[in-house]
Amino acid sequence: MSEPLDAGRARQALLSRAALGVFKLNGQFLTIAEELAAPAGLTAAWWQVLGAVLPEPLPVAGVARAMGITRQSVQRVADLLVERGLAVYLPNPAHRRAKLLAPTEAGRAANASISPQHRAFADRLAGAYGSDAELAEAVAALERLSRALTALSDPPVTEP
């Protein structure tokens, strides 16, 4: 037996609300990131790519996958970071042509200089949201939604 038409419409409306909400959040986060990164001489995009390789060097494609953005846009930013001495390309033992992107000391210093304003904004956001626990729940819900969307975009597993 099929579901009532209203249930499908309700889900469609929820999907639209979720997408529009995330689009708005993306714009808000980009604005905040630009404001936080500017005093360090970075853009939001530079900060995003540099932040992805702080824990360990990654190939451009790995940064793109982690950030959910195109490899080409990461490549442009990576080249600018290298040109400005904030990152370097290193040999990749796993792939001869796909170099690893790694931060330089100047890149690490630029990122570190953002930390005090970043922390202050995080404190303001938690206060405006209500509590640390409520903010953590919201973040967990966004992460769960992202995992569900990723699962839908992965190819289906077929039995041999």
Image (cartoon, rainbow, N blue to C red):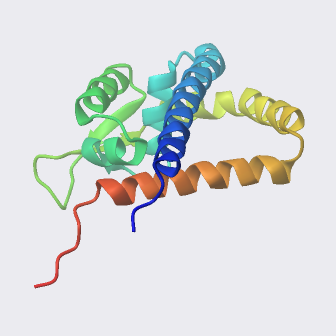
Q: Nearer the viewer, residue 26 or 67?
A: 26
Which residue is located at x 45 percent, y 59 percent? 3
Q: Considering only vertical position in the picture, is 155 above or below 45?
A: below
Residue 136 shown left or right of residue 155 in the figure = right
Q: Position of residue 51 (x, y in %)?
A: 50, 39
Residue 15 shown left or right of residue 66 in the figure = right
Q: Position of residue 4 (x, y in %)?
A: 48, 54
Q: Nearer the viewer, residue 78 or 3?
A: 3
Q: Nearer the viewer, residue 9 or 148?
A: 9
Numbered label tally: 0
The quarter of the picture where the C terminus appears is bottom left
Q: Position of residue 146 (x, y in %)?
A: 48, 51
Q: Position of residue 84 (x, y in %)?
A: 38, 19
Residue 87 shown left or right of residue 41 in the figure = left
Which residue is located at x 31 percent, y 20 percent? 83
Q: Nearer the viewer, residue 109 or 43?
A: 43
Which residue is located at x 71 percent, y 48 percent? 138
**Residue 105 seen from this side:** no
Residue 99 shown left or right of residue 16 in the figure = left
Which residue is located at x 89 percent, y 41 percent? 130
